[in-house]
Amino acid sequence: MRSLRLLLAVLTCTLAAARVAAADAAPIRVACVGDSITYGYLLKNPATESYPADLARLLGRGYDVGNFGVSATTLLKDGDYSYWKQKALPAADHFAPAIVVIMLGTNDSKPYNWARRADLARDAGALIEHFRDLQSKPTVYVCLAVPVFKNPYGINEAHLAKIRAIWREVAASHQVPVIDATTPFLGKESLFCDGVHPTVVGAQLLAETVARAISAKTPAAGAR
């Protein structure tokens, strides 16, 4: 009997060690999908100063955060520079994420793209389902775009406000969580390099906002 108890104890310890090793070997992968704000445009070193880089530090060990931001891209499939047509999309798929954070729509507020706004809801829903259909079955978060204080690229805050509303409706209909990255930046133009793209401090605030949402209820891979 004593030998049996010893064997069970050894097995229990072995299984516990195996679980720890498995956790270390398989971090939770977070894919940050977006435009230049995600990429870290105008920052000296986007690889270390962008919001996904800050998010990785905030989430810490056990997470692997990938930056799949592409400057100037649109949510619209028929936009002037569509995210759907960039190599970043299949790269994000291949990353096999457990979590996907989508922040697109800012460039859709430009005149050429805004003229095609009737397709925004359709393409937003299609992007959510695109990621949900991955083999890794990630949980998808919709992150509402940060506010725009100036219009140096044809980006229009009034249009963007309507795009955020569209995202909210689509997120609700697809039952995915929404991260409000707009409110924390209201009245904080100083956190932007050019009125559109966050500074280093702005990127940190964006990362903190996303990290709180993820940490509040860390979803398991495969959650729908």
Image (tube, grey):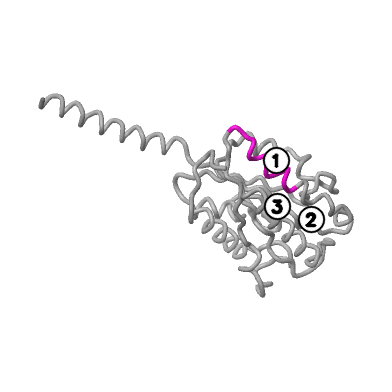
Q: Nearer the viewer, residue 121 or 9?
A: 121
Q: Disc 2 versus disc 3: distance between alpha carbons?
A: 18 Å
Three-letter amino acid code of the residue under disc 1: Ala
Q: Give the residue displayed 76% in from the left and 59% down from the top.
A: 163
Q: Which residues are magenta?
A: 124-135
State the SS at label 1.
Answer: helix
Across and down, in percent, residue 51 comes to 60, 55
Quick check: is 128 in the magenta stretch? yes
Q: Disc 1 versus disc 2: distance between alpha carbons?
A: 17 Å
Extreme-bottom residue of the structure? 187
Mark closest to the chain's N terminus, 1 or 3: 1
Residue 2 shown left or right of residue 173 in the figure:
left
Across and down, in percent, residue 136 comes to 57, 35
Crowding at dot 1, Cα within 10 Å, few <14 / some 14-19 / many 20+, comes out as some
Quick check: is 177 in the magenta stretch? no
Q: What label does residue 170 carry, if any?
A: 3
Placement of the C terminus among the 4 image quadrants = top right
Three-letter amino acid code of the residue under disc 3: Val
Mark 1 sits on what residue? 88
Q: What label does residue 107 carry, if any?
A: 2
What secondary structure is the magenta-colored segment mainly?
helix
Across and down, in percent, residue 119 comes to 82, 49
Mark closest to the chain's N terminus, 1 or 2: 1
Q: Nearer the viewer, residue 104 or 50?
A: 104
Q: Nearer the viewer, residue 13 or 153?
A: 13
